[in-house]
């Protein structure tokens, strides 16, 4: 299984389109902070706008996707002279349509939504991504045609808005994330995206570790498999992924361990060895550093949540 498909399998992703924004000139739309374990995204289908995230001001063009893993509050801004306008929402069955106050022709067509993910593998993956993540899908020959088809489907379904619309838009949003995670970032606004390493040797290393996280992955073994010297491998890996090899190994192993803990009642120690840890204490330390709790407590919490979700209603 390829890198992005494997990651999406691990994180138990939920996807939702919340708004279609048809904003006119001189408009600012404020977006509040999202709850924990939710990451908002925006995909611009037409026009140009700015997206302000803290001190970062991102210029968005058609085909651009911005994902905010931290869920931080932000603003969508359209250019124009005169007094800045706010927005007004019209609720629909599947999503909200947002326009500028006091009317005027729309200058952007922006779909806004969010991803939900679990407190284990999902939190580790989204926490490892650049924040914000800005990917220009419309500026790449590899993705332009697919984006055009995806955009057309999103627009068509949004205009139709009938039975199944929410489910269809959710599936399209999931496809959008897969395209985003495998695409080159906007280097001017986003640091390295490890899920889309451009160097095929580094990309293959990432894929190999995801396929066999429990293997004895030493630096020497990884560098040999990539046909690089140790020093060159460490340098290239950092450039391509924005993290050290050690950090990458820990994150992949913890994400895999979460899946094992969720799918089995086996003791923690065997699970630790399955993901490459010979010591249960070392595994517990690594797990806690990434997830915020011990493996045993995480499993109990997940089991309690599962029982609550599946308990019959009053």
Image (tube, rainbow, N blue to C red):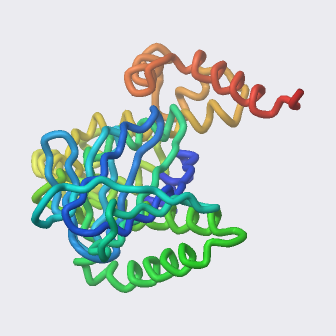
Residue 195 at x, y percent in the picture: 34, 56
Foreground residue among 204 and 227: 204
Q: Is residue 40 above or below residue 257?
A: below
Picture residue at 64% right of the left edge, 61% below the top: 93
Query: Could one spot residue 214 in this view of the protein?
Result: no
Give the percent coordinates (x, y) of residue 111.
41, 64
Q: Quadrant of residue 215?
A: top left
Q: Is residue 207 visible?
A: yes
| Along the line of sight, the residue nearer the viewer: 142 or 174 | 174
Q: Is residue 130 above or below residue 72?
A: below
**Residue 296 location in percent, x, y?**
60, 17
77 lies left or right of 310: left
| Observer-nearest of 80 and 252 | 80
Residue 151, x across and y down, in percent: 43, 78
Which residue is located at x 45 percent, y 32 percent? 36
Residue at figure coordinates x 55%, y 77% from the top left: 159
Q: Is residue 272 left or right of residue 222?
A: right
Q: Quadrant of residue 22?
A: bottom left
Q: Is residue 246 above or below residue 296?
A: below
Residue lying farthest to the front in this orientation: 102
Q: Is residue 144 above or below residue 9?
A: below
User: The C terminus appears in which quarter of the rendering?
Assistant: top right
**Residue 144 as seen in the image, left or right of residue 238:** right
């Amino acid at each position: 299984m390829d890198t992005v498909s494997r990651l999406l399998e691990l994180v138990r992703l939920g996807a939702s389109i919340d708004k279609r924004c048809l904003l006119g000139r001189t408009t600012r739309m404020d977006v509040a902070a999202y709850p924990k374990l939710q990451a908002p995204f925006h995909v611009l289908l037409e026009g140009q706008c700015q997206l302000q995230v803290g001190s970062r001001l991102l210029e968005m063009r058609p085909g651009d996707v911005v994902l905010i893993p931290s869920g931080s509050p932000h603003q969508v801004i359209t250019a124009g002279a005169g007094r800045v306008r706010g927005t007004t929402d019209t609720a629909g069955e599947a999503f909200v349509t947002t326009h500028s106050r006091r009317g005027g022709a729309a200058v952007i067509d922006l779909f806004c939504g969010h991803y939900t993910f679990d407190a284990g593998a999902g939190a580790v993956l989204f926490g490892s991504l650049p924040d914000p993540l800005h990917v220009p899908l419309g500026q790449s020959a590899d993705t332009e045609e697919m984006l055009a088809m995806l955009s057309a489907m999103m627009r068509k379904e949004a205009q139709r808005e009938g039975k199944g619309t929410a489910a269809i838009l959710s599936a399209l949003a999931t496809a959008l994330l897969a395209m985003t995670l495998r695409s080159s970032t906007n280097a001017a606004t986003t640091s390295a995206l490890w899920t889309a390493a451009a160097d095929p040797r580094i990309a293959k290393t990432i894929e190999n570790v995801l396929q066999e996280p429990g293997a004895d992955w030493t630096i020497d073994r990884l560098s040999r498999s990539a046909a690089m010297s140790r020093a060159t491998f460490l340098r290239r890996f950092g450039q391509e992924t924005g993290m050290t090899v050690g950090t990458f190994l820990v994150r992949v192993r913890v994400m895999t361990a979460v899946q094992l803990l969720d799918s089995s009642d086996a003791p923690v120690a065997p699970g630790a060895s399955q993901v490459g840890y010979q010591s249960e204490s070392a595994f517990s330390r690594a797990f806690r550093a990434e997830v915020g709790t011990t493996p045993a407590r995480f499993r109990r919490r997940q089991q309690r949540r599962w029982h609550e979700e599946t308990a019959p209603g009053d």
